[in-house]
Amino acid sequence: MIGGLRRNGHSMSALASSRSFVPGALRGTLTVPGDKSISHRALILGAYAPEPIEIRNLNPGRDVRATLEALIALGARVEGAGSSVRVLGGRLREPMGTLDCMNSGSTARMLLGVCAGADVRARFDGDESLRRRPMEPVAAQLRAFGAKIESTDGTLPLQLEGTPQVQTRRFILITPSAQVKSALLLAGLFSNEPISIVGDKFSRDHTERLLRYLGAPIEWDGTRVELRGAPTRRDAIDVAGDFSAASFFITAATIAPGSDVVIRGVGVNPTRTGLLDALLQMGAQIEVLDEREAAGEPVADLRVRHAALRGITIGPDVALRAIDEIPLLAVAAAFAHGETKITGVRELRTKESDRVAAIERLMSAVGIDVEVAANGLVIRGGTPHGAGGMVETHHDHRIAMATAVLAAGAGPLAIDSDASIDVSFPAFLETLRGVQQA
Ligand code: S3P
């Protein structure tokens, strides 16, 4: 019963409840969970070798659990529970059943790469939302690598047979996706073959950084990656705080008058901080304090105070570095003086939900005008007004949390279901309650 509920994100609506959000300033200090992207990668690199590796501050959400359970099904061992675990890996084997990636695109795409390289046969599936998301870009590149992949229409469920004989070691990335890039790097790693990739557009580089931290010979410059060998060390991995999780509080504090918060220990990898750059350009008051490092990633404390914003143009390079934060940039734009144009948003249509449509629903809930073109959005800022309206989340965790942020500045709003929040940030509601003055 519990397993069934967990396996299918959408059947969780049985447990879901609608939820209301109130306006109010954010004040005080908070922390966010470990980074989801880094957590997936830490577990996967843990499964690469038999010696144990310690991972601390692992993201507690359902997506990362999907990766952890799939790696166990592939033969890895995970000791400990919660945010501190020890992973022991080595030679992976064919799983007994289907690998259930639940709601997690990262799990599906990166583990396809792992199985391709480890010469493992596996069937991949996920929940209704993941079954709609494109797998063909990653499948096409892994076929060139040498894997056999069958799916009816380029989506899950999908059957993969890894390869003992690598065919291609040099790739041109056909989509500017960190997940596809990482799938290829992991395929190379698990097959012990060097891999080079060109055509990246500064997508997030967590896989590269973690490989370097663990001693692998790897070089990259944002457009090209070359992995020449395997990690040599099993140093403990302290996962940086999740910038995407922090972004909800950065944006809420920026738009809610009277706010002043400090968010501690946030990862500020420049391939992730497009939201910070865009908000600063809009006039936000954000200080980056006490920069340090955790497992090869820059980390800092962020102080954010309420500020008046102005509309700007956000190009595709910034949009890629804020790919999961575009709904929040739209929320900020609603409060800005003048128009904000955001280009390079096509990819948003195939995230956990169609996030362009979600932005339209968010804006309409507070009476703000948005114009949608093929690959762009124009938001005309004004005085957003939340009057208790309900925003449909379409089971998308980031849209559920973005609604809470919008309400902090605009007035009361509700969501149909809060069940999806568990995907990345189970303690979100509690954390918000801790800093929000009603
Ligand atoms: C991720 C990369 C991004 C992002 C996703 C996580 C990753 O996807 O949207 O939430 O961990 O590599 P794409 O790079 O495929 O756009």
Image: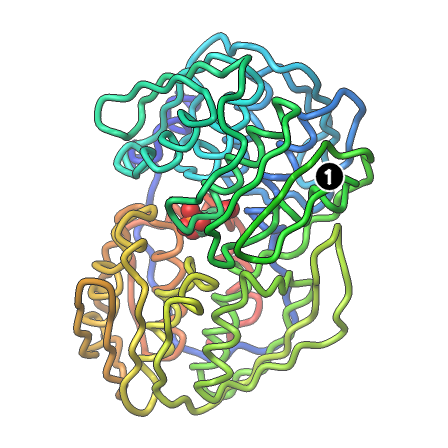
Q: Nearer the viewer, residue 45 or 316?
A: 316
Compared with residue 63, is residue 225 higher up or lower down, i.e. above or below? below
Disc 1 Cβ-to-ligand 1 distance below 8 Å = no
Picture mark count: 1
> Which amino acid is tagged 1?
Ile
Q: Nearer the viewer, residue 273 or 431?
A: 273
Task: Give how far across and how far down residue 64 sits, in percent.
Answer: 54, 37
Q: Nearer the viewer, residue 110 or 79?
A: 110
Q: Secondary structure at mark 1?
A: strand
* Quadrant where the image shows the N terminus: top left
> Residue at the spot x=77%, y=40% of the render?
214
Image-based side of 413 in relation to 46, left or right: left
> Residue at the spot x=67%, y=54% of the render?
240
Is residue 317 visible in the rendered image? The answer is yes
> Residue at the spot x=46%, y=74% of the render?
252
Task: Give how far across and how far down residue 184 sits, in percent.
Answer: 52, 35
The residue under label 1 is: 55
Image-based side of 266 in relation to 374, left or right: right
> Residue at the spot x=61%, y=42% of the render?
39
Task: Give how far across and how far down residue 66 sits, in percent.
Answer: 50, 31
